[in-house]
Image (cartoon, rainbow, N blue to C red):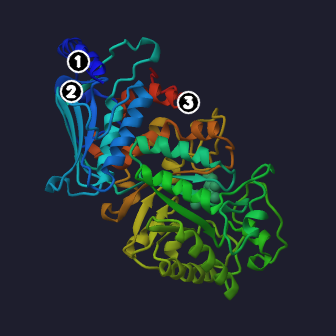
Amino acid sequence: ISCIFVALFSCEPEKKKRVLNLPQTDLAMEPMIPMPMKVIPTNSGFALDKFTAIYTSENADGFPEVGRFLSEKIHAKTSLDIPVNTEDTPEREGVIYINQSDSLELNAPEAYQLYITKDSIILNANTSTGAFRGVQTIRQIIPEIPNDTVAPYQVWNIPTGKIIDNPVFEYRGSMLDVARHFFSVEDVKKYIDLLAYYKYNVLHLHLSDDQGWRIEIKSWPKLTEVGGSTEVGGKSGGFYTQEEYSDIVNYAAQRHMTIVPEIDMPGHTNAASVSYPFLNGNGKEVKLYTGMRVGFSTFDTRKDTTYAFIDDVVREISAISPGPYFHIGGDESHVTKKKDYVYFVEKVEKIVQKYGKRMIGWDEVATANIDSTSISQFWSSKENADLAVEKGMKIIMSPAKKAYLDMQYDSLSKHGLHWAAYIPTDTAYEWSPETYEGVPLENILGIEAPLWSETISNIDELEYLAFPRAIGYAELSWSTPENRDWEKYKVRLAQQAPFLDRMNVKYYPSPLIDWK
Ligand code: TNX
């Protein structure tokens, strides 16, 4: 042990020399996305190297885990092995502290502050969630040095300065449609990893639609046996067992993200009705559907058994969904009579509340007489948004023309639809959720970018539509309007290429961006 100690020690002079030679930096010019609220550069460098250690508040809930997460990610980027809360290396120099702090300034659930000096990085947050967000900032300012150019005693020069940060919106999400095409647990985890890096806190899973039912319901096994058997295009579909779904939920929770489960009803229910025909309310014979049309299916909204079924589904899913929300869909119920639709939404809202969840629905749900605690997800109708505001509801902004990840970039895009718009990378970024369609700011819970999957069936295609646009929505939902500017953003976006490449993300190389 003493030999190792001596060996370590003998490296010290070399290290110190390197520290002195670190070039000038500018923290404000770093490729951070979303842009933090306040960045004050001090122009020198913190040397991240093999002498660095991480120490966290040890008794504060979740802080050691956040420290270990950072250590893992530093390893993935630099191959360095940075110990967390270690006691056996007194000669550590250049320490990263992750502290729980009750300072009033940090009195917000996701706020953090970073103080980076030559000698240390101090990350303060009130909650482990705030600390986790701050860790993403640290990850983003560690230089990306290609493996083959890493020197034997490489130093990663981290710009010094101060960052004060807190998100504008509390709900920052993306949705993945696993119903039109099924995506594996592994694919979903990769998407979660990428979203977490950009400080998203919600992944909404669209778990059922006409073409497929994707989550095991123990009391109604045919939903997955029959309803999960296929997908758009007719290949075999798939579903998550409750165990697999819980695995996704836990994986997200470790990244301080919430899974919002959606069971879309009373329309978009063909797969459920094929499994249990008593549910069907459109008067036609039901069969498995593998096309792309919408709006032809409905539950029978006047049968008690329909609500007994829904009660079981909401109960089983809520029991394995620790987040506060349950999404009931409610969109495009074109073959449900208006009064039946309203009756249905009001009854299902009560079921959702009974299981302790807050209901979210697509914007049409605001046509029913629902509670101010329920949430409307704006996708196309200003009229429905106004109804939600009148009811005092919160709104999640997902305008199809701006925020739909399944819209094509342009007419040459390999995947995607264009019924709402073509959405090039700049259009996706250059709009103001704060003022869109006149929804008052105080009603806006946040932003969500939905990725419908009629035209994509694997992770590469998913990534083509989601990236780089999803990175822009991260900034729209976190950063203040003053900190958002396309010309500056596009420079930072270009600098995401090394990260995306390292993560093997098949992003769309938008010609608007001068990729590095
Ligand atoms: C509309 S937006 C739908 C989805 C489709 C999507 C395709 C909404 C609430 N419903 O069923 O997948 O368009 O872009």
Which residue occupies 57% across, 64% down? 262
**Amino acid type, residue under disc 2 in the picture:** Glu
Picture coordinates of residue 263 (x, y %)?
61, 67
Please state which amino acid type lies under the numbered disc 1.
Phe
* Label 2 vs 1, first from the N-terminus: 1
| Residue in the image at 55% along x and 46% along y | 189
Give the mark, 3 or 1, whose residue is nearer the N terminus: 1
Graded by Cα atoms within 10 Å as few (under 14), some (14 to 19) or many (20 or more), the crowding at tag 3 reads few
Rendering coords of residue 494 (x, y %): 42, 26
* Secondary structure beneath label 1: helix
Q: CA distance from mark 3 to mark 1?
A: 38 Å
Side of 255 relative to 301 (left or right):
left
SS type, badge 2? loop
Q: Is residue 34 visible?
A: no
Rounded to the nearest angstrom, the CA distance separating label 2 from label 3 is 37 Å
Q: Secondary structure at mark 3?
A: loop
Q: Position of residue 440 (x, y in %)?
A: 33, 63
Q: Which of 452 and 275 lies nearest the eye of the viewer? A: 275
Do callouts 2 and 1 mark residues in contact (Cβ within 8 Å)? yes
Residue that carries the numbered disc 2 in the rendered image: 91
**Which residue is denoted by mark 1 in the rendering?**
9
| Dot 2 crowding, Cα within 10 Å, few <14, some 14–19, many 20+ | few
Location of residue 305 in the rendering, given as x and y in whole percent from the top left corner: 70, 85
Amino acid at circle 3: Asn
Q: What quarter of the picture does the N terminus occupy? A: top left
Residue 504: image tag: 3
